[in-house]
Structure formats: C-alpha cells, structure tokens
Image (cartoon, helix red, strand yellow):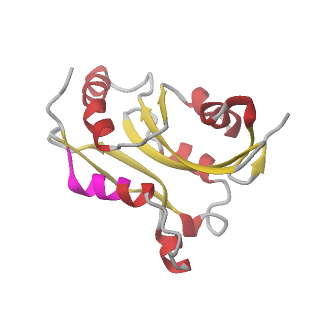
C-alpha cells in the first residue's frame, strides 16, 4: 500500500553520495562523507526528508565518536519511527567489505499512526535507494543491541569483525 509520500531530492542526493565511494577522494572529502544518517517524514507528512543533525560523518569516527554503531543506535528516537542508512564496514574470513544497510526503525512505543504511515511509505524510499543489499526492520533497542546483531544481518557467521572490532566468538 503506497502512502503518496514523496522522497525529496536532498534525500536521494545523500543516498547517492553514500553509495558511490570515490577512490580518488582526498582526505577532506572522505572526512565529510556520511557514515550514518536518519530520515523522517516532514511535519505535513507529505515528504521524506533528512532528520536535521542526525548524522555521523566519517571524519568523526575515531575522533569524537569511538563506536559509530553504538552512537548511531543512540540517535534513534525512543518513541517515533525513522528510516536510516548505515554504511557498515566489516570483514569476512575472505575479504574486507563496505555495504549500506537500510534500516526501518519502528519501535513498539511509537504511535500507531506513525508506524502505519512509515510502513506504507517505506516502498517509496526503498525504490529510490537502488542497490541496497541489506534491509533491516527494527522494532526495539533489543534488536540493535550490539555489533554481533549487525554482523548477523551482514553475513552471519562468515563476518569476523565490524567497524574494525573483532567479534566475540
């Protein structure tokens, strides 16, 4: 069921920037790249927009933010829905990878109307986010508790580390 909600050009531009990894990017450009970002519905419920100030830049990782996934989880509102993109860096037994994860955050404590509008608008944003390999619907913080949970979404038992941190065996 489509809700008629539109995805703004700004949201699409952010997705495209996160999706395309520029090999020749200089250090300054790399630091400004987004590691994670939240999207929300506009106040009039007609557009999916950037959730102001709810982002993590690559330049912050290792300086002001030591645990990017933990910081990302804390950015999620406890009682409302959001869409999010998280640029996960992980290693498997064979190789090092980076993948975008699309997350639909719909906590049990969110109002029913909010959950319904976000759920019915999810296809609109997913259609604009071509090439997403991992999608995750999350209904509470217990679903996001640690790097291990993220690793399971990314590749299960073949994942050996997430965000440079080895997983506990």
Q: Quadrant of residue 47?
A: top left
Is-magenta flag for residue 76? no
- Which residues lie in the magenta part? 7-15
**Total numbered labels:** 0
Q: Where in the figure is residue 90, as x and y percent of width and height?
A: 67, 48
Q: Where in the figure is residue 142, as x and y percent of width and height?
A: 60, 27
Q: Where in the figure is residue 27, as x and y percent of width and height?
A: 56, 78
Residue extending farthest to the right is 169
Question: Going by the image, does 140 lie left or right of 39?
Answer: right
Q: Where in the figure is residue 39, as x and y percent of width and height?
A: 34, 46
Question: Going by the image, does 93 lie left or right of 23?
Answer: right
The C terminus sits in image quarter: top right
Chief secondary structure of the magenta span? helix
Question: Going by the image, does 96 lie left or right of 143?
Answer: right
Is-magenta flag for residue 14? yes
Question: Going by the image, does 106 lie left or right of 111?
Answer: right
The N terminus sits in image quarter: top left
Q: Is residue 12 above or below residue 27?
A: above
The residue lying toward the viewer, choosing from 131 and 111, is: 131
The residue lying toward the viewer, choosing from 156 and 77, is: 156
> Residue, x 29% and y 52% (percent of image)?
12
> Residue, x 55% and y 64% (percent of image)?
58
């Amino acid at each position: 069921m489509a809700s008629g909600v539109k995805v703004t050009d700004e949201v699409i531009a952010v997705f495209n920037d996160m999706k395309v990894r520029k090999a020749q990017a200089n250090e300054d450009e790399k630091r400004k790249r987004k590691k994670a970002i939240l999207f929300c519905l506009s106040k009039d419920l007609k557009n999916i927009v950037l959730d102001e100030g709810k982002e993590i830049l690559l330049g912050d990782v290792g300086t002001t933010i030591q645990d990017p996934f933990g910081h990302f989880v804390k950015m999620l509102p406890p009682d409302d829905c959001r869409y999010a993109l998280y640029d996960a860096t992980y290693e498997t037994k064979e190789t090092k990878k980076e993948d975008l994860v699309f997350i639909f955050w719909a906590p049990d404590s969110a109002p029913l109307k909010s959950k319904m509008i976000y759920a019915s608008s999810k296809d609109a944003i997913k259609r604009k986010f071509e090439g997403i390999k991992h999608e995750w619907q999350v209904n509470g913080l217990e679903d996001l508790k640690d790097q291990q949970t993220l690793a399971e979404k990314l590749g299960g038992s073949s994942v050996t580390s997430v965000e440079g941190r080895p997983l506990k065996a």
